[in-house]
Image (cartoon, grey):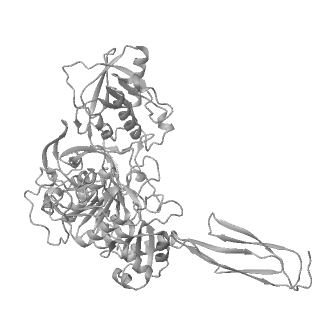
Amino acid sequence: MADAACNEGSHCRLVIVVLLLILLLPLQTFCQQSTTKKEEAHDSMIYSYKHGFSGFSAMLTESQAQEIAELPEVHSIRPSILHPLHTTRSQDFLGLDYTQSAGLLHDTNYGDSVIIGIIDSGIWPESPSFKDDGLGPLPSKWKGKCLAGQAFGSNQCNRKIIGARWYDKHLNPDNLKGQYKSARDADGHGTHVASTAAGVLVPNVSFHGLAVGYARGAAPRARLAVYKACWGSPPSCDTAAVLQAFDDAIHDGVDVLSLSIGAPGLEYPASLQAVKNGISVIFSAGNEGPAPRTVKNASPWAMSVASATIDRAFPTVITLSDSTSSFVGQSLFYDTDDKIDNWYEVYQSSCLFGTPETSNVTLAVGKIVLCNSPNSVSLISPTIQPVWNILLAVNALKEAGAKGIIFAAYAFDILDVVESCGSMPCVLVDFEVAQQIKQSADENTALVVKVAAAQTWIGGEVLAPKISAFSSRGPSPLYPEFLKPDIAAPGSNILAAVQDSYKFMSGTSMACPHVSGVVALLKALHPDWSPAIIKSALVTTASNEKYGVPILADGLPQKIADPFDYGGGFIDPNRAVDPGLAYDVDPNDYTLLLDCISAANSSFYKAVVKSPPGMKISVEPSVLQFSQSKKKQSFKVIFSMTRKFQGGYLFGSLAWYDGGTHYVRIPIAVRPIVSDNYADL
């Protein structure tokens, strides 16, 4: 694998992805040509791509890969890399009212007959979200398979999960520990994503009494095709497997492809081939915000989705023994008995565990810990604060015997990070509340605190949507000429299926399937719309305000959102039904763009020569072109005399210049000799 332990100089084998000259050379023709290096590549092949594009993945040594790269039939060759995964009120908040007798859901029969392909960590087929009650036969265009495997029989596909494939040829035994060698989801991410996009209506769903209601996907009657390309815990997705999933999905006949995964490498040309086949491709934008230039998946033919909050909150009341007033934070604290007075002493800490500032956690035994470190927001990257700190604090303090945590944070966008607290109260509060509690604790060393169970609030009292603090921001560092992300959708604190239960997850991974489901509805209503028209309809009708208030973006500081936060704005499915005008693009036009991108990724160096007096220096060739597959080039330097004189050393230089910041110069010393019978020393 690409992340295998390959020491310098070792003869290790890596998963290498080879793309052939697309549509010019069929894969089988390449493989049948009888040269040793091609036969070696064929014997080492693990995946082959033939439906949307030509190419293959193989286990090759670096020297074998270099030989393959030099063949004229090869378009590009790169190591296969791992991509991280990006992870019920939300559908109502989008205006997708299940009970109405008119509107987008009703008019499309809830997305029936549309096929959504999910490239992720698999699926848990027994979840109630994937029952097929009331669904008709499989769509006639479907050409896919339901591959059996460990704990996943072919009979576990149904009229809801109509296809399941899995890709493990690139893995070694260590990668498969704790995993199912099948499309079954060991992690929960893929199941959560699939149910968010197309889960059927499930009544009486909650998280231990919080967020009670019906769970359903954006397109609850759409069909699901599952492509398990992501493995491990947390799951990561190998390029080679993702490419095979793309290729199979194109063949199988999906209408929409949903990918809640990290930055793609070779998925760009693969996703373009899907779009050329009429498939809308939806990516998550990444979870590295609120820092700018962190957005991922910037290909213009696909959609990149940012994350936003919804109009639901979980207020949690904190009572201080020496105060008649109460403070409010948010939590998922559910297991408390109000008949028992659970008052606990307060222990103060920075809770920056893993840093030199860590306090003695043994002092937290039996107490509620106030984690208050205002300086941490400037000392630590906003990307990992407060999420990573909260996770470290929860683990350390639970092990130490603490009875609760009150954690100061600048945003409440990822409440699921405190889910592991269970029946122990873990409350997020803003820094103002934390400071007031700190002040009370400083003034009264005998202060005790009580935390009530969280409540559920929904509706206009909750300011939403807001762009999630973690949601990656534009512009794209790779392709800044394309405005990304494209649109925002619910991604914070989303309740959806995980194995046999329902749990909260947050991330652009959760925002992506919301858009995928809406795209399925639009395809059902407008089967003649191209992926470009659907994208245009969603982006141009997106909202920049709610209830007359501009959409805000959480971060440091909170601000009014702009296109680098949410693209066109927050998705409005019902307005997208009739956008008035739409921008259409012939996907073949993007082929020229890919050629330009390939050229931009190549490094051209032009020779700049300064010849010594009386000498002429020429270089052949005078221009060197480097690429991912051609990292070495040879050239010849020719010296000639313009005047015949014999003397001492003369000096000049040769430089290679890329037209930008690189000017690679070497000095040259020349001693001309006209005759061996005379020397000027």
Residue 344 shows in the view: yes
Res. 578 visible in picture: no
- Look at the image and tell me in which quarter the C terminus lies: bottom right
Q: Tag count in the figure?
A: 0
The residue that appears at 32% across and 31% down in the rendered structure is 427
Instruction: Locate residue 320, reporting x and y percent.
Output: 32, 19
Relative to 565, does residue 588 appear above or below in the rendering?
below
Quarter of the image for residue 256 reads bottom left
Q: Residue at x 15, y 63 (%)?
A: 154
**Residue 461, percent across and down?**
26, 36
Q: Give how far across and how far down residue 612 sits, in percent.
A: 80, 76
When the figure is inspected, residue 90 is found, relative to residue 613, above or below; the finding is: above
Horizontal placement of 383 versus 667: left or right?
left
What residue is rendered at 42% in x and 19% in y?
Answer: 439
Which residue: 91% across, 80% down?
679
Residue 5: image quadrant is bottom left
Depicted 493 relative to depicted 60: above or below:
above
